[in-house]
Image (cartoon, helix red, strand yellow):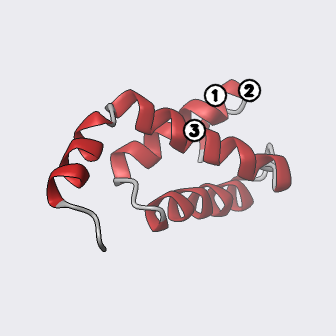
Amino acid sequence: RGVADEVVREAVEAVRPEDELERAKDLVRRRLRSAPVVPGSGVERARQIRRLMGMLARRGYRTDQAGRAVREVLSEVGLDPDEV
């Protein structure tokens, strides 16, 4: 609202995919600080991963971006996201 189409277009084009992925990973890291994923509990872990994916989807991230961000952050903290 109130922003010229050209300005919006330039701003969107300036965002690189790797920057967007890094922002998604930052969101996942922040969420994990307040609600860490439970290791060893398959059902609970699957629920938490779905919630992380949903959080990113509500913020406009595509499913593939959200999945990659969640997998990479879980790997960073030593959890295997493929065990779900």
Residue indicated by mark 3: 25
Q: Earlier in the sequence, mark 3 or mark 1?
A: 3
The kind of residue on which mark 3 rests is Lys
Q: Quadrant of residue 45?
A: bottom right
Q: Earlier in the sequence, mark 2 or mark 3?
A: 3
**Under tag 3, what secondary structure?**
helix
What residue is at 27 percent from the left and 46 percent from the top?
Answer: 12
Q: Which mark lies nearer to you, 3 or 1?
A: 3
Residue indicated by mark 2: 78
| 81 displayed left or right of 5 | right
Q: What whole-number distance in Å separates the C-alpha atoms at marks 2 and 1?
A: 5 Å
Q: What whole-number distance in Å separates the C-alpha atoms at marks 2 and 3?
A: 15 Å
Residue indicated by mark 1: 75
| 49 displayed left or right of 58 | right
Mark 1 and mark 2 in contact (Cβ < 8 Å)?
Answer: yes
Q: Quadrant of residue 61?
A: bottom left
Sort mark 2 into few (<14), some (14-19) or many (20+) by Cα contacts within 10 Å.
Answer: few
Above or below residue 74? Residue 37 is below
Q: Decide which of 11, 20 is in the foreground and name it.
A: 11
**Under tag 2, what secondary structure?**
loop
| 18 displayed left or right of 55 | left
Circle number at residue 21: none
What residue is at 22 percent from the left and 42 percent from the top?
Answer: 10
